[in-house]
Amino acid sequence: MTILLFGVTKDIVGSPSLSIPTTNIMGKPIPKTVKELKEFLFKRYPAMKNLSSLAIAVNNNYAKDEESINSYDEIALIPPVSGG
């Protein structure tokens, strides 16, 4: 599963994208919903917990926590933005 990163999420991870295995690794289940993906990311990158908000888009649409995700979906992390 490939996740596109923007803004501060790109800085936290250190890359414009992130690959997550799509198979069960060491007994840990892979994320199947947006909520599970957030939990996975917060454990792996604790600095993301400090963001005032973190939206996730699945296939170019903002997704709610209960939405299912698959390895073939286009997933993007959208951090808070500031205007000027």
Image: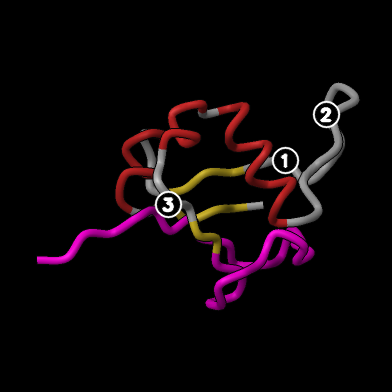
Callout in the foreground (3, 2):
3
Quadrant of image for the C terminus: bottom left
Front residue of 22 and 48:
48
Q: Is residue 60 left or right of residue 28?
A: left
- Tell me which amino acid carries mark 2: Ile
Q: Residues within 10 Å of mark 1 (few under 14, many from 20)?
A: few
Q: Which mark is residue 5?
A: 3
Classify mark 1: helix, strand or loop.
Answer: loop
Local crowd at mark 3 within 10 Å, few (<14), some, or many (≥20)?
A: many
Q: Position of residue 17 (x, y in %)?
A: 46, 48
Query: From the viewer's perspective, is residue 61 above or below residue 42?
Result: below
Magenta residues span 57-84
Quarter of the image where one finds residue 42: top right
Image point 38% across, 40% down: which residue?
A: 15
Check if mark 1's residue and mark 2's residue have beta carbons within 8 Å: yes
Q: Work out whether mark 3 precedes mark 2 in sequence or the reverse, and give the earlier one.
A: 3
Residue at (59% x, 44% y) in the render: 19
Residue type pointed to by label 3: Leu
What SS does tag 2 mark? loop
Q: Between 19 and 52, which is closer to the camera in this rendering?
A: 52
Q: Earlier in the sequence, mark 3 or mark 1?
A: 3
Magenta region includes residue 75 = yes
Horizontal side, residue 72 vs residue 23: left or right: left
Disc 2 target residue: 25
Alpha-carbon span between mark 1 and mark 2: 8 Å
Mark 1 — residue? 21
Asked if 21 appears above or below 75 in the picture, the reply is: above
Task: Identify the residue at the far right of this view.
Answer: 27
